[in-house]
Image: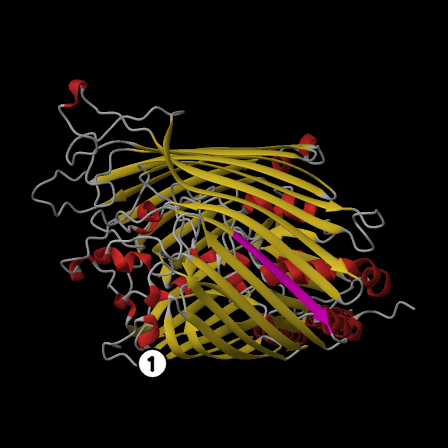
Amino acid sequence: MKKLMTLLLMAFVCVGLHAQTKSDLPNVTIKNLDGKDVNISTLSNNGNPIVLTFWATWCGPCIKEHNALNDVYQDWQDETGVAIYAVSIDDSRSTAKVKPTVEGKGWEFNILLDVNSDLKRAMNVSNPPHTFLFDGTGKLVYQHTGYFEGAEEDLYEEILKVAKKKK
Amino acid sequence: MHKHILFILALALTFSFRASAQSFLENSQVSGSFQTDAQYYMLDQGIGITDLNGKKFGINGFGKLNYTNGNFSAGIRFEAFLPEMNGFRSELNGVGLANFFASYDNGFIGMTVGDIYDQFGSGLVFRTYEEWSLGMDNALRGARVVFRPTKGVTLKAVYGRQRYYWAPYLERDFAADDYRGIVRGIDADWDLNQSIPALNESKFKMSLGGSFVSKKQFDQSSFYNIPLNVGAAAARINLGYGGFAFSTEYAYKVNDPSAINNFIYKEGRAILSSLSYSQKGFGAVLQVKRVDNMSFKSMYTGKQNNLDINFIPPINYTHTHSLPSMYTYSTQPNGEMAAQLQINYTIPKGTALGGKYGTKLAFNMSQVNDIVRDSVAFGNQIGLNEPGTLGYTSKFFAISNHRFFRDINFEIDKKIGKNWHLTAQYINLYYDIETIEGHAGAPVVKANIAFLDATYKINKRQSLRLELQGLWENEVYAGYEYEESEKKDYQKRGDWLAALLEYTITPHWSFSIADKWNYGNPVPEFRDHYFTGSVSYIHDATRIMLSAGRQSEGVVCVGGVCRTVPASSGVSLTVSTSF
């Protein structure tokens, strides 16, 4: 009996030890386009990679980057299951323009609103665009600032490294 | 027997302690960022820099560290201005710990002590924020409590004193020019869709909010009777149904005589509303705003861009190309009425006009006029805006003929074939430079602006980008007759041409050369070229940018990143990284 208890205790402790999965997604709550609260630390994509991109309606390179990402998003999703969350750092000057901009440009990403720059501060973003890649467990594996023509290809190579084998 | 139990307990305790210590360490996360912007200034007779005033260098830098562990987080930001770069306030000169905080938030209750950035609603009565590229930081040093009693309900309370460059926060240390008050605020937000289960999945969206903010200030005036407490309140509502969204916020402030409003005792009001409709491929938004005597600062003598408790957003289009961004509108807190309409439409792929990739169109129009002010007394015994009086009365819906600003622009964005990408925009601008920039007597800027931005992909790794811009003023041009004594008001006026060529090697390198030419300035000696060359290197989250040449004021976007820069001549270096 004692031995069983010991084993149970040990097992419990061990499980406790191994249940610690470290996620780099910060405990910050912002809103989505429907006004719903989204805690970033709870984002999950069934073990597939997550891309967080910071942008603003007034940032030219960001618009270029997102137009380029949108062109390939469907293919990327089919091949790797990746989910892109585009975090707008527009403040009250331009928050109302975010949804019409996103819809008008036909972007398919999940859009989040960081009106008070809480997530921007927590993730140490200085200037948009700034792109983060998390693997299926929420571990930060790659980040990149700025956008150059064709840079989405490099992001995709990084996504392929952490994506679960699909084919 | 007992020995065994004790042994097991001890073992379990040891393990669980080790487990918690280990999980504590495993959950510990440190992240941060660094940035240094440095400039070496040179004399440049050509653009009127004949004296550096003993300042050859300007260096702005910060280092920021964040620590998080589960629900706990803390951070510090160290800043150095040695000395500050040109265009930044000289009070920033110095080095020190500018910002720190510690916070615990378990979702039900959150507490923060230290420097707080937050906003209530759209910020009409309270917003603290930091904008490095502008040297602007009005953080509230104090405490904040956030309470979420039930899903969809958020209650907040803040208390503290705002950052004023490097001024100490203790009351007893007040300098003669620093009479900052204490700011206190509460806010409630109720999202009906999250708190009422029946509405969780409804197409109908509704949220309500309200806030109250007050400042307690110190009357230092021997002439005016400055109120000890000034309160401001705001109420807001957001509604949505399918593709439609409507939101509005109304704010009211009691009498608040200040240097900005010329010490009048009138109440302040502001309203900001927006209505939008969007569906895949189409989006439209209409915004209207009315501001009446709504400057709200925690130091009533302040006139600069600091110690603002509230934020009145300019709602016009934000231009990022260098010529249109020379004339950027800023909010007139003493009174304005503004409207803005933006339409985005994508002509679908596969249609005659849409082509293979679709064609993106955008239209934007914004206009700002003054409010109408009437005398507070019959027979005009009291002049408008007379200090120490109620100032004026203003009809809510009356719009003055005095136009501050108008911007009508149209943009087309098209990918042609696999290798070409074109963006073109036409802008018609009206800019009352006398009101917005304080150039008394200077004629209004009425201009047509056009740009073409063409990117050619040489191959997978390399691309070339050419940007051509022109700005043509209708009334002020080469040959315009000006008063010799007002010559300096014509700096940057008249016609401009600008070109930029950028060569990028993805993912690391970007090389660019650019010239801006004020060829049509009425004053011959201001017809200058602003030539710059720059190289930038990006590796993951590190960016190094070196540039040399002349820079005129505006927003510059090179190497995929935008920032605002003041006029200068010389060499500048920016290094930034985050981890």
Which region shows up in magenta?
B449-457
Lateral position of residue B395 relative to residue B156, left or right: left
Residue B376 appears left or right of B409: left
Left or right of B281 in this view: B194: left
Q: What type of secondary structure mainly makes up the magenta span?
A: strand
In the rendering, at what x and y percent does residue B138 appear?
A: 35, 56
Amino acid residing under circle 1: Met
Quarter location, residue B11: bottom right
Q: Residues within 10 Å of mark 1 (few under 14, many from 20)?
A: some
Q: Position of residue A60 (x, y in %)?
A: 59, 60
Residue at image mark 1: B42
* Badge 1 element: loop
Q: Which sits in the foreground, B113 or A133?
A: A133
Decide which of B462, B483 is in the foreground and name it.
B483
* Vertical side of B317 occupied by B89: above or below: below
The percent position of residue B62, horizontal first and vertical second, equals 41, 73
Magenta stretch containing residue B52, yes or no? no
How many numbered circles are shown? 1
Res A104 seen here: yes
Q: Is residue A105 visible?
A: no
